[in-house]
Amino acid sequence: MSKKTALTPTLSPEVADALATGQAIVALESTIITHGMPYPQNLQTARMVEEEIRKAGAVPATIAVLNGVLHAGLTDDQLEDLAQAKDVAKISRADMAVIMAQGRTGATTVAATMIAAHLAGIHVFATGGIGGVHKGAEDSFDISADLMELAATPVTVVAAGAKAILDVPKTLEVLETQGVPVITYGQDSFPAFWSATSPLASPLRMDDPVAIAKAQKMRTKLGLPGGQLIANPIPAEEEIPQAEMNPIIDQATAEADAQGITGKAVTPFLLQRIFELTEGRSLIANIALVLNNARLAAEIAKAMR
Ligand code: PSU
Ligand code: MN
């Protein structure tokens, strides 16, 4: 433990080439693959998202820990193995080093993906939704490490707002306390994941991917650590309105409470129950919004170079 050099993730040939030639790169998380969607839609979505980024003129870098090795960019075989693997760890900032030291395989959450992207020199990351302050957090203290990571690590994260399974007003308050810019793309209302709008006003609004990239650079120039959260509304024709989602979310949340689901298991449990209760419609919307986020992230990444 004498040298103070940071670890560089193992790069796929495509990502290594993109970094060497200064192409735009978009990081992608893997918890959405292993804990956020069922097989085989998880694998199909992961492939579609990567393709969408390439079509937009950028290079995708899916992040994961495979047998203790941190990867930025997975081959299609690695993606397929991960999508079908059982007992994959869900890695956040707290467990990243431990899982690697043990030589285990783990999928990276938003927090861990940001850490890996930054180590690789990638500045933009697309996902579905970030973790946040859970309902009842005043008792459970369940606040995702994603929020503190946004305050610490200089990566711009494109998500479809915060999932309505969270306490969204409290999530916005914690982000403000942590000094994280929350910027909604193209509208004033803060989007609610499956729903394009919510009753909440977005703290900030920007309409231009080039200016979004400039804001991240400006933040770093000011000596401020951390990234930005870009909230990108699901396309209106693909949304499930809040009036329809809210009773379903309430039911899933009540079931999680009744069954004593806590900690890391909460988000995967709620997503699976909402998938069942909407008869798969939540998954269709989830796929649409991730693709939409991939497209915007590619535009920001092209401007970030
Ligand atoms: N949003 C989704 N699907 C997911 C997640 C978020 O639509 O799978 C994952 C992300 O990886 C996020 C994590 O970082 O859930 C948050 O988990 P927790 O609430 O335990 O911090
Ligand atoms: Mn949590």
Image (tube, rainbow, N blue to C red):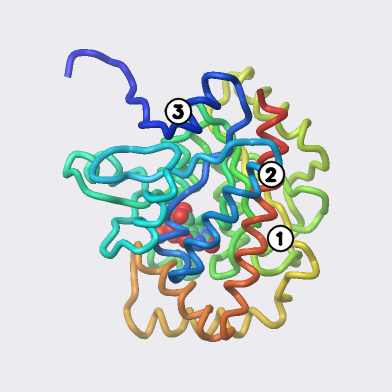
Q: Could you tell me which residue is drawn at 24 percent across and 45 percent down?
A: 67
2 or 3: tag closer to the N-terminus: 2
Mark 1: give few (<14), some (14-19) or many (20+) Cα within 10 Å. Answer: many
Distance (Cα) linking label 3 and label 1: 30 Å
Left or right of 244 in this view: 35: left
Q: Could you tell me which residue is drawn at 55 percent across and 34 percent down?
A: 155
Distance (Cα) linking label 1 and label 2: 25 Å
Q: Nearer the viewer, mark 3 or mark 1?
A: 3
Left or right of 39 in this view: 232: right
Percent of width and height locating residue 103:
19, 43
Mark 3: give few (<14), some (14-19) or many (20+) Cα within 10 Å. Answer: many
Image quarter for residue 97? top left
Q: Could you tell me which residue is drawn at 70 percent across and 47 percent down?
A: 295
Q: Nearer the viewer, residue 191 or 81?
A: 81
Location of mark 3 (residue): 120
In the image, is residue 5 above or below residue 18?
above
Percent of width and height locating residue 100:
24, 41
In the image, is residue 246 above or below residue 153?
below
Location of mark 2 (residue): 55
3 or 1: tag closer to the N-terminus: 3
Distance (Cα) linking label 2 and label 3: 22 Å
The answer, for residue 143, to whether it is visible in the render is no
Left or right of 232 in this view: 73: left
Q: Nearer the viewer, residue 28 or 255?
A: 28
**Number of dots carrying numbers:** 3
The amino acid at mark 1 is Pro
Helix, strand or loop at label 3? It is helix
The amino acid at mark 3 is Ala
Location of mark 1 (residue): 191
